[in-house]
Amino acid sequence: MSTLDRFESVFNAASRDVFVRQLVKVGRVLIVHDLAEALQDDFLYLAKGFLTVLEDRDKPEWELFGGNKPFSVREVLNAVEQTKPNLIVTYRHLHSTVGEWPHSLGEHVDVLTQSTSTPVLVLPHPGRKDLPGHALKNTDRVMAVTDHLAGDHRLVSHAAYFTQDGGTLYLAHVEDDTVFERYIAAIGKIPDLDTGIAREEIRARLLEDPTEYIDSCRAGLAEGDQHLMVESRVKLGHRLADYRGLVEKNEIDLLVMYTKDDEQLAMHGIAYPLAVELRTTPLLML
């Protein structure tokens, strides 16, 4: 390695993403539902009870859209445009005939999460009976996940906002070990490179960046007036299985993740598989 290359490597290694908290404000909430009139107040009470953190932060206005008569996706998007909420609250399989099948969120929710810039909170269907005991009680255990945690200030800021004071914010990052092994296998075919050293150095580098970013998140969040614990969960593994295991083991009340991708119409990265799999966990989709 030339002196210039070595200097560049040292310089790049010293570069750090430092957390910068972004302002999050929820002044208006739009609840989209397909419930009969007799059930609407109960669902509003449930949503407000789960999101007491919003009353602590901004005391938002709550509005309802929908009913048990069918409405189109376009009508929902028009309601969002007219209301201009800071948060949309809905649930899986809204006005959907595929509720018995676990393979999607339902067409209304799928489009809603991708066609608006407003964060969408997707709850389990209100008719579901097999929720874990801690579900929908509060948000004192929140987890943020992403394909690339370092530098995701917006994601972390939203996750912190929705974490109750005194609660725990889990920042999780799982490097895909299948992709890692594929690159190590390629390195193993290059005679001039030591595969053993490459494996250890690359693994350490991949995990060090998100770990250091989480440290900066912990420091940055400690400077505010919100009191919360920040827990780090960084590892090399199987993304879907490991994220699901982390959610279940830590009894997560709310999972926060990105869903939009500038390069495609489909949901971003690991978000859709997680959204489909974690059917009893509330999801905040940014």
Image: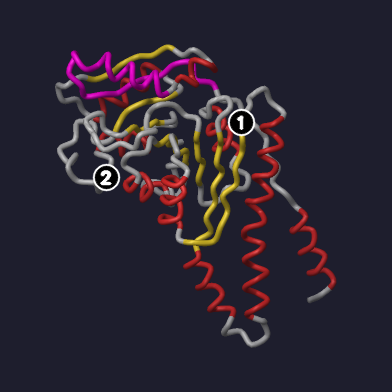
Q: Reply above or below: 8 against 281.
A: below
Q: Which amino acid does label 2 sit on?
A: Ser
Q: Which residue lies under the disc numbered 1?
A: 228
Q: Is residue 17 magenta?
A: no
Q: Which amino acid does label 1 sit on?
A: Leu
Place of residue 23 in the rendered image (x, y in percent of width and height, measured from the top left):
60, 25
Q: Residue at x 33, y 48 (%)?
A: 277
Place of residue 32 in the rendered image (x, y in percent of width and height, measured from the top left):
30, 23
Which element is circle 1 on? loop
Q: How crowded is the residue under tag 2: few (<14 C-alpha within 10 Å), some, or many (20+)? A: some
Q: Which residue lies under the disc numbered 2?
A: 104
Place of residue 91 in the rendered image (x, y in percent of width and height, measured from the top left):
30, 31
Of all residues, the one furthest to the front in this rendering is 133
In the image, the segment drawn in magenta is 25-50
- The mark lying in front, picked from 2 and 1, is 1
Q: Quadrant of residue 194?
A: bottom right
The answer to which of 261 and 59 lies nearer the viewer is: 59
Q: In which quarter of the image is residue 28?
A: top left
Determine whether label 2 and label 1 are within 8 Å by CB.
Answer: no
